[in-house]
Amino acid sequence: MIAQSAWAPRTPWDENGVFQLARVFAGEDDVPVMLTQGYYPGASALIAPVYWFTDDPRVAYTWANFLTNVVAVATLLPLTGIVRRVGLSLPQAITVSALSLMLPAYAGLNDYVLAEQLLTLLIVLTAYAVMRFWSAPGLANGALLLVSALAALITHPRALVLIGVLAIWLIGLLYDKARRRSAAVVLVALVPIAYGAKELADHLASLVLFSSFSQGGALFETLTDPDVVMLLKTTFLQSWAQLVGTLGILAFGAVVLLVWAWNELVRGRRFGPGVFLLGLAFGGSVLSWIAWANPSSHDYSGEPRFDSWVYTRYIAPFVLVAIALGLSALLLRLSWAMAATSVAATVVLSLVVVYVFADTVPLWGSTYGPANIVALRAWESMWPTTPFEIPLTPTLTDANRFWVLASLAVVGSQIAMALVSRVPILLSAALVPALFLYANASDENLPREAPVHMERGLDAIEDAEGGELAAVSFDMDCDPGRITIIGPRATTLNWIGFWFSPRDVDVFHADAERPESDVVVACEGWADADALGAEPVKGTGDYGYQLYVVRGELQDQLRADGLVGAGAAAP
């Protein structure tokens, strides 16, 4: 249902990065470069076979979306294996896993072609491998652990957290007599191979970049020049957002993990799977908190962002197991003490968010990106579209009421789940429709973009040339807006690279060289047009750019056809 609107990429960065590198892996030559920070190759390798059968971008997107959704559904298997190991029957385990994946943060990804679907599968598979390795530390389980973790790293640089947590856990196992030998073997293999995998992934990601791979810049900016207040703000706001997106289920899971890890570390004096799972959830969360704790992250094209404060997409893959454990504990009749602790922690966190941090968040700000805050979209009707004066302390009736109402809904949901958990079958029966409706209400169904006017112009040019595909040159020296990684220049180059497939698209610098092609994409009112004798193709403007045809036979033909020159009509 959610994927029905998935006919094209949402933005020209995250998804386009996956597709352009997939074209390289499929064997295409001269794939257009992108102006972006770069994306790791795992998801691109997954969808690359699509380009063996089609070069139509719309068809490719549809099939790629299908493949990534198959991967998302496959996450059910290792997740079921994990919760089976904490005492659930097979039907209960399947139910818990399906309910966990039904939550908006995961179901909402079905609308896109992102690395997160594969990353989530591989993180959960690694967690399952950890539990198997703990039970039977043999060669097969060690290999599964190593391969799944390294595959996650190849898929996304955020999986460096997974590698770090796994390495620490394996070091802890060196003090376990029954497991130290196997742990040492996996650890010795993990460190150098992970380093090599990261170097390879950086190199492959750079194959379609105008410059070099640079993901993680915001993280290092925060680490080198930390703003403690902003870090606290992102920590509380993003943690609260995870609770809202899971209706508080994550709080139950967090308490379960804390108790589990405490028993292993303090009482058992060992690094068991609970320690790893707690480290995984905490490490992934810390990564997101730090990455968004800098001023440059909260601006989009000169306008304030809302999504950056309550970002849910980064943390979601790392806490899925914790969510499933929270649901499992409820079905196993979670103790009143642990349930009360979960609710109390949620109340405290919500009070801090509402009365300390929420008053200065631009609730009307940008939520542009794909699935950035899909976990919260059910509440979108409470986000105003026009600015209000801040600070504004949230109340039940003012423009900032979202924070109060969402907090009350989470606490109410937790209390209801804790009470109904005394009858597990009733809890399951209630959660299935409730989470289905919550996920459906969170379906973003956001508009998709394409340079439609340029596409029409290219079609007209190609019709005039007898159907032969036109090569295109893009001028890197002009930009109708701010020259940033999300400005008009980057937006236009990244879009035409995807949408103009399978045409050749090259870049040039008009100040120093001539374009290789007769058809040029350049700024409207292009300053170098006269020097090249270039004529604009009327009606082809997108993002402050348009098509031009330089002096030559093609231009003469198009002038005769009425597509350029005085009196030309839009295609």
Image (tube, grey):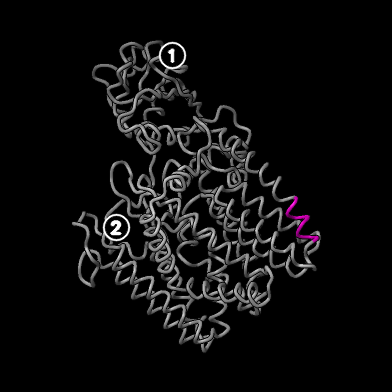
Q: Residue furthest left?
A: 389
- Which quadrant does the C terminus fall into? top left
Q: Which residue is mark 2?
A: 361
Q: Residue at x 63, y 70 (%)?
A: 274
Q: Which residue is mark 1?
A: 513
Quadrant of residue 203 in the image? Answer: top right
Instruction: Estimate the x, y position of residue 482 in percent, counting from the top left.
Output: 32, 33
Mark pair 2, 1: CA separation: 47 Å
Q: Residue at x 53, y 62 (%)?
A: 282
Label 2's element?
Answer: loop
Around disc 2, counting alpha carbons within 10 Å, would you say few (fewer than 14), some (14 to 19), or many (20 or more)?
Answer: many
Q: In this orientation, which residue lies closer to the viewer: 508 or 271?
A: 271
Is 364 positioned to the left or the right of 203 in the image?
Answer: left
Residue type of the residue flagged with mark 2? Val
Label 1's element?
Answer: loop
In the depicted structure, whether residue 61 falls above or below residue 251: above
